């Protein structure tokens, strides 16, 4: 009986290479290796060049005394005698974050108001909103900042002629000075009460939403939340014996010291960022509202729903799915555009860190790398939060 040989499936040469999955893995390994090699070459070449020129490298300079003062440090006590470059970095980052935290909500508020007014049936109101949008967004941001800065410095009186409200608030071309709250022992109780108030508000909002879905009855969530956020900390503040005192600004003939201050440079930065970014957000809001079918509005009116309630509870919630993605981009732009504050002397990271610190320390590679990493981190965190919020408010099919 003859034995047949070679009865198995034929073996084709290059079988593994013809597998798309295997080729994909191979290409990814090659690309990752190339990127790693390129990054290593850049780092190694930079280190060799710095060493050849006698330029020190590394981050040890962060502990070196800075030797210069900063105009604005609201979150950290900056002492000229002991401050290091690390302290300067913290001040620059905190001021940039502060500009973003204040600027983004204000620009959103301006944008929503102007965007809704652009759709007003009142011709004059709609034209005013249109002129605002076209004027603000077609002027470069740098000119916005210069305009607001020179307006404040030129129009506001000098220190000796400062406008005052009693002995506690002063307004001059040096800034707005006011009383600064200074917590005493036991103020931590107020902080704990505020944290509990936030948790309670979250619980109330969830309960109200569940109740409305089940019964259709609305609950005054906004008013109750405001009452909780204000009332609970105030009760704790009173029970703790009012552990707080105020540091008032002191006025001399040529200067103002003490208290809390809003410098004209930082104020001009905020005004410019809000006015400029608000114009773009207004167009985003207008487009989002117009993306909703007009039949939604007509259906609400036919049921007797008032126009303001229709806009707040029917149109805006649906328009948000169109508004949020481009709104995220505007938040990122506002945060990064704050770097232009260096042109008017605002105390943000580019001014005090990439400006003064770079000139003194000479650690260009490290300082620029830290600045890039800071902006990238803030941008990624902002994008992550807005993506989470966009997912949370997305319409769901029932």
Image (tube, grey):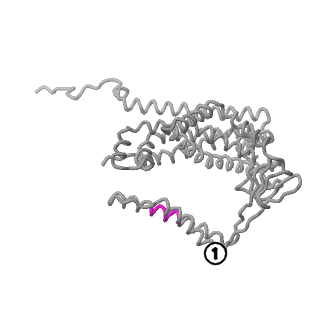
- Mark 1 surroundings: few (<14), some (14-19) or many (≥20) residues within 10 A: some
Question: For this view, does 235 lie left or right of residue 265?
Answer: left
Q: Give the quarter of the image for residue 52.
A: top right
Q: Is residue 270 placed above or below 280 in the rendered structure?
A: below
Question: For this view, does 380 lie left or right of residue 11?
Answer: right
Q: Percent from the top left, x then y, of residue 155?
A: 78, 42
State the residue at coordinates (79%, 32%).
Answer: 53
Residue 66 covered by magenta stretch: no
Give the magenta part as a residue range.
197-204
Q: Is residue 188 visible?
A: yes
Question: For this view, does 7 lie left or right of residue 222?
Answer: left
**Residue that protrudes farthest toward the left in the picture:** 1
Q: Give the quarter of the image for residue 10.
A: top left
State the residue at coordinates (71%, 35%).
Answer: 47
State the residue at coordinates (50%, 41%).
Answer: 116
Q: Is residue 356 placed above or below 171 in the rendered structure?
A: above
On the rendered image, what quadrant is the N terminus found in?
top left
Q: Percent from the top left, x then y, of residue 305?
A: 38, 50
Q: Is residue 235 placed above or below 10 in the rendered structure?
A: below
Residue 199 covered by magenta stretch: yes
Q: Secondary structure at mark 1?
A: loop
Q: Is residue 392 visible?
A: no
Q: Which residue is mark 1?
A: 240
> Overall secondary structure of the magenta stretch?
helix
Q: Percent from the top left, x then y, of residue 176?
A: 75, 52
Instruction: Using the image as rendered, state which of residue 291 and residue 240 is in the foreground.
Output: 291
């Amino acid at each position: 009986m003859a034995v047949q040989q070679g009865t198995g499936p034929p073996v084709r040469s290059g079988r593994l290479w013809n597998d798309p999955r295997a080729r994909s893995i191979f290409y990814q390994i090659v690309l990752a290796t190339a990127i790693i090699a390129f990054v290593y070459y850049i780092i190694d070449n930079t280190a060799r060049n710095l060493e050849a020129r006698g330029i020190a490298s590394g981050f040890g300079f962060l502990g070196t005394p800075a030797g210069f003062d900063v105009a604005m440090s609201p979150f950290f006590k900056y002492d000229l005698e002991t401050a290091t470059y690390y302290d300067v970095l913290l001040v620059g980052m905190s001021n940039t974050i502060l500009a973003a935290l204040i600027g983004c909500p204000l620009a959103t508020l301006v944008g929503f108001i102007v965007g809704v007014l652009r759709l007003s049936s009142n011709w004059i109101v709609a034209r005013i909103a249109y002129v605002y949008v076209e004027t603000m967004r077609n002027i470069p941001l740098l000119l916005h900042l210069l305009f607001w800065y020179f307006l404040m410095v030129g129009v506001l009186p000098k220190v000796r002629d400062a406008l005052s409200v009693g002995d506690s608030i002063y307004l001059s071309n040096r800034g707005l000075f006011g009383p600064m709250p200074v917590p005493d022992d036991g103020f931590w109780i107020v902080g704990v009460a505020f944290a509990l108030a936030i948790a309670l508000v979250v619980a109330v909002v969830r309960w109200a939403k569940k109740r409305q879905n089940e019964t259709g009855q609305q609950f005054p969530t906004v008013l109750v939340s405001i009452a909780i956020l204000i009332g609970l900390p105030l009760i704790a503040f009173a029970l703790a014996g009012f552990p707080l005192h105020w540091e008032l600004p002191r006025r001399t003939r040529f200067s103002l010291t003490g208290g809390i201050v809003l410098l004209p440079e930082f104020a001009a930065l905020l005004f410019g960022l809000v006015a400029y970014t608000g114009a773009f957000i207004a167009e985003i809001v207008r487009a989002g509202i117009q993306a909703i079918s007009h039949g939604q509005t007509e259906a609400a009116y036919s049921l007797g729903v008032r126009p303001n309630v229709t806009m707040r509870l029917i149109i805006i919630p649906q328009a948000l799915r169109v508004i949020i993605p481009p709104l995220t981009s505007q938040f990122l732009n506002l945060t990064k555009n704050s770097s232009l504050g260096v042109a008017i002397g605002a105390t943000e990271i580019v001014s005090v860190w990439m400006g003064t610190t770079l000139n003194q320390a000479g650690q260009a590679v490290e300082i620029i790398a830290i600045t890039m990493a800071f902006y990238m981190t803030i941008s990624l965190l902002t994008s992550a939060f807005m993506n989470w919020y966009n997912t949370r408010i997305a319409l769901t099919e029932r």
